[in-house]
Image (cartoon, rainbow, N blue to C red):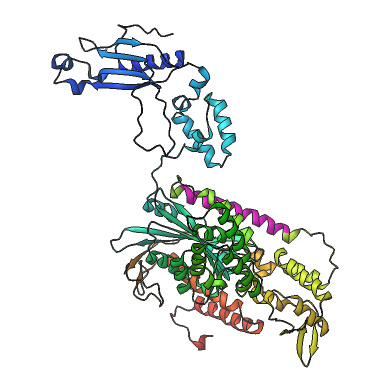
Amino acid sequence: MPVLEEGKAFKSLHELEEFIKNVESDQYIQLYKRDSKKISTMLKSCPKKCNNANRDLIYYLLTYACYKGGQNFKSRGEGIRKCSTFRDDCPMRLTFRLSPDGQKLVLTKVDNVHNHDLDKTMFSLLPKQRRLNTDEKKEVLRLKKLKCSKTLLKDYMQNKTGKKLSLSDISNVRSTSTKDDLAEVLEYLEGQPESHVHAVTDAENVLQGIFFQNQQMADYFCTYPELLVIDSTFKVTKSNTRLYMFLAADGNGEWLVVGSFITHNENPDFIVCMIRVFKLQNPSWVRTQTIFTDKVSTERKLVSQEFPHAKVRYCPYNISKVFESGLTKGITYSDRDTVLRVFKKLSSSKNSEQYKKNYDSLVDIDLPAVIRYFNENWHNCQEEWVFYREKEGFLYDIPNTHQLHLFMQKIRPLYSLHINHQDFYKDLLRFLETTHNERRQKAVQMMYRNKSTSIAPNSAEDQYFRQLTPFAFKFVKKSIEDSQSMKLVEYDKIYFVDGTKMTVDAEQCQCDFYKHTTIPCQHIFKYRSIKNMELYSENIVPRRFKRQLYLENYRSKENTADKKIKVETLEVKGVDEVSLDGGDNDNMEVTVDNDDEDHQMITRHQKRTRALAICQQLANVMAEMDTQSFYQRYSKLEKLIQTWSSSKSDAVGDEDL
């Protein structure tokens, strides 16, 4: 046990610090440096002693005090904000001075009296005693990367170190990596196999954003481009960057990441540039029919301009949060809850009469600020968020938007406040690979395992079951079952359902369900039944819901571990001149700086990359042809390959085909 007596001398600062640590652990007190004077600052006052002093001692005068001692804290505030302090005017002091010969630090004054109890348990809970060393922090970071539960991680480290840790201690352990610079992220992404990386710079050639898409993402979107989600809810305030995610839905109702970009600059020019990069990289964007976005008016207007043929809708899973964020701050909690309940009823209105009734309920609440906010931002764009108006869009609620919410909740923890961008992309790629492998396993089971069903063999249901994904089949099965109990009345080649005129034939219908899914509805099956036609027909089911197309996404492909797509740098010009009120933003130029200009030497890999892009478009066009046209053009392609393989001519005319 260290003895606190005046005159005790220490030959080094390290020896003194070890003495203080022993005093703290033996007496259960926490000391801090209350006052000090360094030798370097006392040269003029005491030149004789300081000039001959051991400079490694550093201090001329050093005073330690109890953590509850020292100068009392005096708040300058008005007491509105709650605050507290350890300071409680404890008189305990230990004072050390430089010895006359300047070679030691001597304990010259001891005041070992406290005005509070000394308790071992309370001492172990103080912040300094809970502090983790470097090796312990590395262990915590390693386990946090594995997404371990913080509670279990805290218990593990507490048992290992013997320190009384809290959950905040675990949360506060962060990576000290400084790899948040976009240039370093760009270098990392460039090294990924089969990746399309585009760097966006401003007029001063300063990197502002990065677009990233690997070949797997591109293949997903090429196969399922009809529905696109642009989510920009991820933002890191530490580095002031925003992450945009592009997502699509496959034929089995599962969500897929099809692209992403991060940007320091939320200027509309850069958002437009990134969207145009996505379009440039994915020719199938012309087949996109419905787009879900967040409630950011500027970004929504830009998306509408860049996808003029698609219908832009609010992202359904967070529409209530978006509405709530715009409510006036002066509203009470009870009124806020009432308004939100009415808004949910408005969004789920099934017809105009129900919408008007719910709107009147909102007006009856008598909150002028809320009514003004609703009329200015929501009432005039019902087709973008109200159920009965949204059904006019393709693939509305197909797949279930609740699944989209769950999928986004899995991605969101990857992009936390304190993670750097490089670590995020590493985690994202691991997550996507894991998700792909899980769905591949599901596809294998779909292909080889016989599902136990009560469907009669060789029936129409059985044939649809073998042709469609499980997600699409449940809709077709329900339509067949409903068609058996419904009445479809024909009068002078006009059909009526419950007195309502219905335009229907063996392959198409004008009901809401068919218009926004193109999945055969009960009216089509009833019509085919009346006309004594087979209920099963391969041609009436959309290609995107077919099982074969779904399985193709998860078949083993050529090993591309060594393939890389060249990084292209894009420059945004005319930053302050983009029109958001209409037009095509012609006064903004997006230039691509690369070495692949026409008539210049390019590598074999660059040739292959260009050719693959054209062939991909060709495959998409041919996939939409009828069978006869397909085989005609397919035979021409075979002849074209034979001609080019045997000829060195750089041009092939009709005579060669």
Front in this rendered view, residue 607 or 14: 14
Residue 207, placed above or below residue 503: above
The answer to whether one can see residue 24 in this image is yes
Q: What percent of the width, then of the height, locates residue 18? A: 38, 16
Q: What percent of the width, then of the height, locates residue 468? A: 72, 68
Q: Is residue 52 left or right of residue 646?
A: left
Which residue reaches farthest bottom? Answer: 492
Name the image quarter holding residue 115. Answer: top left
Residue shown at 36% from the left, 58% from the top = 208
Q: Which quarter of the rendered picture does the C terminus lie within?
A: bottom right
Front in this rendered view, residue 579 or 73: 73
- The segment highlighted magenta reads 423-445
Residue shown at 56% from the left, 78% from the top = 621
Q: Which quarter of the rendered picture does the N terminus lie within?
A: top left
Q: What percent of the width, then of the height, locates residue 311? A: 54, 73
Q: Is residue 488 left or right of residue 265?
A: right
Q: Is residue 505 left or right of residue 321?
A: right
Residue shown at 54% from the left, 23% from the top = 162
Q: Is residue 365 left or right of residue 134?
A: right
Residue 173, placed above or below residue 235: above
The answer to whether one can see residue 558 in this image is no
* The stretch drawn in magenta includes residue 638: no
Front in this rendered view, residue 3 or 93: 93
Q: What percent of the width, then of the height, locates residue 265? A: 37, 59
* The stretch drawn in magenta includes residue 429: yes
Residue 37, placed above or below residue 412: above
